[in-house]
Image: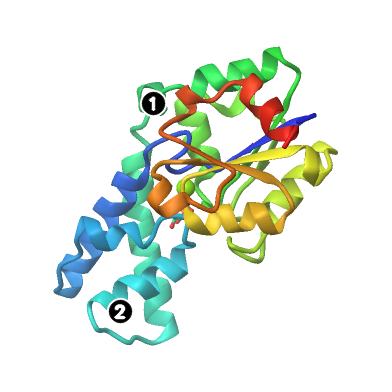
Amino acid sequence: PIQACLFDLDGVLVDTAKYHYLAWKRLAEELGFEFTEQDNEKLKGVSRMASLDILLSVGGLQLEDNVKQELAERKNNWYVEYISRMDASEILPGALEFLQQCRENGLKTALGSASKNAPIILQNTGLTPYFDAIIDGTRTSSAKPDPEVFLLGASELGVPSEACVVFEDAEAGIEAARRAGMRCIGIGSPDTLGEANRVVASLGDVSVALLQQLAAE
Ligand code: G6P
Ligand code: MG
């Protein structure tokens, strides 16, 4: 049976994509080009520096590493300012209820996020107490689709991969889960998340019964 749930943060528990977008767009404007919401889709689940590379390629710019470091820092300062105003009202539909259900059913929980800002976001939204382990972008050396973040989460929980289910909204995250040997539920559209074992619109559509059904497959 399933013993643990591993959650991505951005796009699964909270909608921070809009704040990442505001900050990247502001940076692009300073650099003199436009960055659309459609461009922003390519940044979901992607690390900060890899996101900057994608943004710069949209603007047709090639910059030195030290300049890139400075730009990433500038973007992050704006982002941190936006998320400092977040509260529990920004938890996505069904997320809190499902985390509570995990607790009531004795399932362990871990966060598995590429974001170095994950702990502040959990704190501001009041979600920290719902996690037995928190793996954020400061604790891994390889980004999704590398399975490191989920393998580390499972090992901290002391649960084998085959007893874990991952919740992800990004293709790279689904691939990471599969490479970790874990079952995976995609949150979003089947068009992009087809590799997941199941795809649902939100955590409101997930139950502990569904997890045990997955385990039996
Ligand atoms: C998540 C988000 C990405 C973001 C990354 C790094 O994976 O989906 O959009 O770039 O985290 O976040 P950070 O807060 O460390 O810049
Ligand atoms: Mg995500």
Circle 1: residue type: Asp
The answer to whether 91 is drawn above or below residue 84 in the figure is above
Label 1, residues with CA under 10 Å away: few <14, some 14-19, many ≥20: some
Image quadrant holding the N terminus, namely: top right
Tag shown at residue 57 = 2
Q: Quadrant of residue 137?
A: bottom right
Query: 96 or 64, which lies in front?
Result: 96
Where 203 falls versus 162 (above or below)? above
Residue at horizontal 37 percent and vertical 42 percent from the top: 16
- Number of marks: 2
Which image quadrant is residue 60 in? bottom left
Q: The disc labelled 2 sits on which kind of residue?
A: Ser
Q: Which residue is mark 1?
A: 87
* Mark 1, secondary structure of its residue: loop
Q: Position of residue 161 (x, y in %)?
A: 78, 46
Disc on the earlier residue, 2 or 1: 2
**Residue 125 image position (x, y, % from top left):** 45, 27
Q: What secondary structure is marked by label 2?
A: helix
Q: Residues within 10 Å of mark 2 (few under 14, many from 20)?
A: few
Report x, y in % for residue 107. Answer: 73, 24
**Residue at the location (26% across, 63% down)?**
39
